[in-house]
Structures are given as C-alpha cells and as structure tokens.
Image (cartoon, helix red, strand yellow):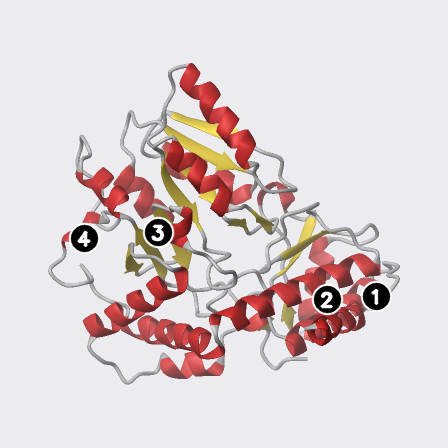
C-alpha cells in the first residue's frame, strides 16, 4: 500500500518526482521559458499554429475559445458522442442561442460519412455553421474519435474546427496541421502528468481571423484570446512560473523517451488492459474506437462503484475512478495515461482491483494483473 494515495485517475495523474523537483525552481526568464514550451508543443503536435498557455486547467481553455470565437447569432455545430461533448452545450450556450447538436451513439466513434451526410442535409435546408466543437477522447467513456477523418469533413464545408484533445494529447500521435485542426485545447494534468493548473491552445491563422473580424467585442478580459495575439510579450498577465517549470520538464521527458516510444507504450498498455478486463469476465463499455489513455468497464453486478472506490483507497492506497454524467456509478475507468502508463504501476493496480472485486463477491475468471502481464509481454516479444 502506498504511504500517500496513488492517483490512478484519467487525470489528474500521479506526478513524477523529476517534475515535482523542477517545479521548485530556480526561476528563469518567464518569456524565454514560455517560448521554449510553446515550441516543444508545436513540435510534438506537428503544427505551425501558435501555441499559448493559460493559467487555469482545461475548462479555462474551452471557455476562452468559446468566448473569443462565438457571438450571439453565430451558428455552432456541437458534435457529441459523450459527456464532454455534451458539456460544450453549456459553454456554447453562454454566447449564442443558435446551435445544433449532431448526437451520435456513445459506445463508438463518430462516423465521418454520417457527419458529411448530415452537413449536406443541413446545407440543403439553408443552414451553415461558423464552427464545430468535437472531443477527440471523451474522458468519461474513453471513446476516441478519428479527427483525421472528421476534421477534413468540416474543412470541406468551411467550418472552423475546435477540438478538445485534453485526454488524448501527448499519449497518442496527433498531427494537427495534417488533420487541419483550427483550435486544439490541451491540459497539463493528463498524459503530461503535471499537476492541474495549466491549459494550452494551438490556434490557426484562420481562427485568429475569425476572432479579429467579430461583429461585437469579446465580452471578457481573462477569456479574451486576442490579448495573447496582441500582447507585446508572450503572456498578457502574470505567468505561473513554477507551473511552467514543471510543464517544461514533462515535455522534456517525452522527447527524451522518444515520441514513438511514448505512443507505443500507451498503445501496448491499453491493449493489454482491455485484454485483461475482458479475460476476467468484466464487460468493456465501448464496442470499438478505444483510447490508448483510458479504459472503461461496466460496474459488475453484486457491487457498486462507491464500494469499489472505497476499498481501493482504504485497502490499497489507490484513488480509482468512476465516471461522470450519465455514466456516473455505472462505469469504472482505468486511467493508463502519462506516468500511470507504465507496466509496474498498471500491474499493481489491476491486481488490487482483482482483489477488491473478489472481496465484494464478484466472480472473476482470471487475475487481471496476471492477464495484463501475459498479454503485454506477448506483444513485446513479437516485436
């Protein structure tokens, strides 16, 4: 059992010691640090879009983009197949009453062909959209939407794309420019394994022009992204210096390991976790389009999500996770992202989860830890 609880959540995650040490300083030139981090994010996400860092967790980025891009009368398309996709309703609704929801089934990814057919049908009705929102990985379910096929559909219809990549970025290879993403939103507390407190945005020139040509002023100071574009330096208000030091170290660790190795590690571990969950007799929530950062499974009969969480914490020192929204108390989530996506930690967590469920009377066919280890090493040996 851990002396302090192991954060095994789909964000925030456990934080590596080197990141904690980096956050202690010493301080350096904030603007140089900011530019260094922005450049690293551009390299990793393969984009020429300008990258900006906000002093607040991911929801600040979502609200800032909504506030800066949307004004009353703008028509917005909300593409949703999950809880966070639906949450864009609240954000968008603060700035315009003209929005349409493209609602899809929650257990698999959004279909690009279905989206294209929907947009053609809307255009035939005389409906067009200024922008569309889309979640790459919807954290409550772990469903992964294929932005490489979905965003080009939006681009063909001249629709700006706002993509939440908070739960996927830095754990899966993303080429923002190849996909054509106009705005990508990120957070520090997921696959980067930093403490929560920073969010990042990659903003295309097309998105900047849309902000600059609004009919009305942006109705906020803190959420006004034009302050970043027009600021004489790179940060328009007080910088979170120690948070930036930790973020720089997280990005350094990724590039030191090698991005291909990082993505391969996440994919292998995710596949081995899914194998272990199914081999034990538990049921995955999704039927396809699994994220390499999160695995969700149905709460088995004979126990409750609250009981599982309590035993995992009290007996094993692990802060485990249920889900959110309509999936709350129905689904459990394994957050194998960032620092938590490593074999010894996953093995320990799955062994503890097996013991927890069995102690609650759940009949499991196999030990999930042993099945995970078996599957993971079979993949390594093949390569």
Answer left or right for 316 relative to 216: right
Q: In front: mark 2 or mark 3?
A: 3
Q: Secondary structure at mark 1?
A: helix
The reply to whether the C-beta atoms of the residues labelled 2 and 4 are less than 8 Å apart is no
Q: Secondary structure at mark 4?
A: helix
Nearer the observer, 352 or 359: 352
The reply to whether the C-beta atoms of the residues labelled 2 and 1 are less than 8 Å apart is yes
Q: CA distance from mark 2 to mark 3?
A: 35 Å
Answer left or right for 181 relative to 205: right
Q: Earlier in the sequence, mark 2 or mark 1?
A: 2
User: Label 3 crowding class (10 Å Cα cut-off): few <14, some 14-19, many 20+?
Assistant: many
- Does 4 sit above or below residue 187? below
Answer left or right for 372 relative to 137: right
> Residue 246 in the image: x percent, y percent?
37, 75
Q: CA distance from mark 2 to mark 4?
A: 49 Å
User: Which residue is the site of mark 2?
Assistant: 311
Question: Which residue ends up furthest to the top in the rendered image?
Answer: 125
Q: Which label number is shown at residue 359?
A: 1
Q: Earlier in the sequence, mark 4 or mark 1?
A: 4
Nearer the observer, 155 or 343: 155
Q: In front: mark 2 or mark 4?
A: 4
User: Label 4 crowding class (10 Å Cα cut-off): few <14, some 14-19, many 20+?
Assistant: some
Q: Is residue 179 visible?
A: yes
Q: Which label number is shown at residue 21?
A: none
Q: Secondary structure at mark 3?
A: helix
Nearer the observer, 308 or 56: 56
User: Which residue is the site of mark 3?
Assistant: 61
Q: Earlier in the sequence, mark 3 or mark 1?
A: 3
* Residue at image point 29% right, 57% down: 48
* Residue at image point 42% right, 64% down: 188
- Does 170 sit above or below residue 221? below
């Amino acid at each position: 059992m851990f002396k302090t609880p192991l954060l095994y959540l789909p964000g925030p995650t456990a934080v590596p010691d080197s990141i904690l040490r980096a956050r202690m300083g010493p301080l350096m030139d904030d603007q140089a640090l900011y530019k260094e981090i922005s450049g690293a994010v551009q390299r990793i996400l393969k984009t020429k879009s300008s990258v900006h860092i906000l002093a607040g967790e991911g929801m600040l980025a979502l609200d800032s983009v909504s506030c800066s891009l949307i004004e009353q009368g703008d028509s917005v398309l909300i593409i949703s197949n999950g809880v966070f996709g639906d949450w864009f309703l609240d954000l968008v609704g603060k700035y315009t009453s003209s929005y349409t929801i493209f609602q899809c089934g929650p257990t698999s990814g959004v279909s690009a062909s279905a989206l294209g057919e929907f947009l053609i049908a809307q255009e035939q009705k005389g409906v067009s959209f200024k922008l569309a929102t889309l979640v790459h990985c919807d954290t409550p379910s772990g469903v992964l939407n294929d932005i490489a096929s979905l965003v080009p559909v939006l681009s063909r219809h001249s629709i700006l794309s706002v993509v939440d990549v908070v739960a996927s970025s830095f754990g899966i290879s993303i080429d923002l420019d190849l996909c054509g993403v106009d705005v990508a939103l990120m957070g520090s507390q997921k696959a980067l394994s930093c403490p929560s407190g920073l969010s990042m945005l990659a903003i295309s020139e097309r998105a900047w022009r849309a902000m600059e040509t609004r009919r009305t002023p942006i109705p906020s100071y803190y959420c006004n992204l034009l302050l970043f574009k027009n600021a004489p330096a790179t940060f328009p208000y007080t910088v979170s210096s120690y948070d930036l030091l930790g973020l720089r170290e997280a990005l350094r660790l990724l590039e030191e390991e090698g991005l291909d190795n990082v993505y391969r590690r996440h994919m292998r571990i995710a596949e081995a976790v899914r194998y272990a969950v199914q081999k034990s007799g538990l049921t995955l929530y999704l039927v396809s389009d699994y994220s390499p950062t999160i695995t969700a499974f149905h709460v088995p009969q004979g126990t409750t999500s609250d009981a599982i969480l309590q035993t995992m914490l009290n007996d094993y020192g692990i802060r485990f996770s249920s889900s959110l929204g309509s999936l709350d108390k129905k689904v459990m989530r394994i957050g194998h992202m960032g620092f938590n996506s490593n074999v010894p930690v996953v093995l320990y967590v799955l062994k503890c989860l097996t013991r927890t469920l069995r102690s609650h009377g759940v009949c499991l066919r196999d030990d999930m830890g042993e099945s995970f280890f078996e599957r993971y090493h079979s993949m390594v040996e093949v390569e």
